[in-house]
Amino acid sequence: MSNGQVVPETRGVTVQLLATVDLGPEIEGMAGRQLRMRMVTIEPGGVFGPIHDHKDRPGTVYILQGTITDHRNGVATDYGPGVGWPEDRNTTHWLENRGTLPAVEISVDIVRQA
């Protein structure tokens, strides 16, 4: 990161896979990819790290409860319930919950099938 901040490892995070759609039969050129929806819970003091990018894995986030702090480019931005942030090829970030309640997000992205 540009500000020299040490990014903690993931802790206090639970990820639940909610649904997937195989995109190959749906959209020409999307063979081997899937649309994925997950529910991510970050406990108070929890971190979704380390710093990671979204090259080849675009997505978007909706916050159901709590506040999630998104760290990117040396800037910390808080997102509360409602629309969160886009995750495109230029996104390099990590997340944390600085609040006192669990933060819950719905994350939808396109990934390569395992």
Image: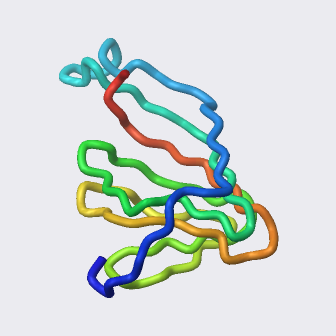
Quadrant, the N terminus:
bottom left
Residue at x 54% of width, y 56% of height: 10
| Image coords of residue 64 (percent x, y) | 71, 57
Left or right, 100 with respect to 42, comes to right
Left or right, 68 with respect to 33, comes to right
Residue at x 54% of width, y 47% of height: 107
| Image coords of residue 81 (percent x, y) | 69, 66
For residue 43, what is the image quadrant?
Answer: bottom right
For residue 88, what is the image quadrant?
Answer: bottom left
Extreme-left residue of the structure: 29
| Image coords of residue 96 (percent x, y) | 58, 69
| Image coords of residue 82 (percent x, y) | 64, 64
Using the image, determine if residue 54 lies above or below residue 99: above
Quadrant, the C terminus:
top left
Residue at x 65% of width, y 36% of height: 16
Q: Nearer the viewer, residue 40 or 45?
A: 45
Q: Nearer the viewer, residue 35 or 95?
A: 95
For residue 25, what is the image quadrant?
Answer: top left
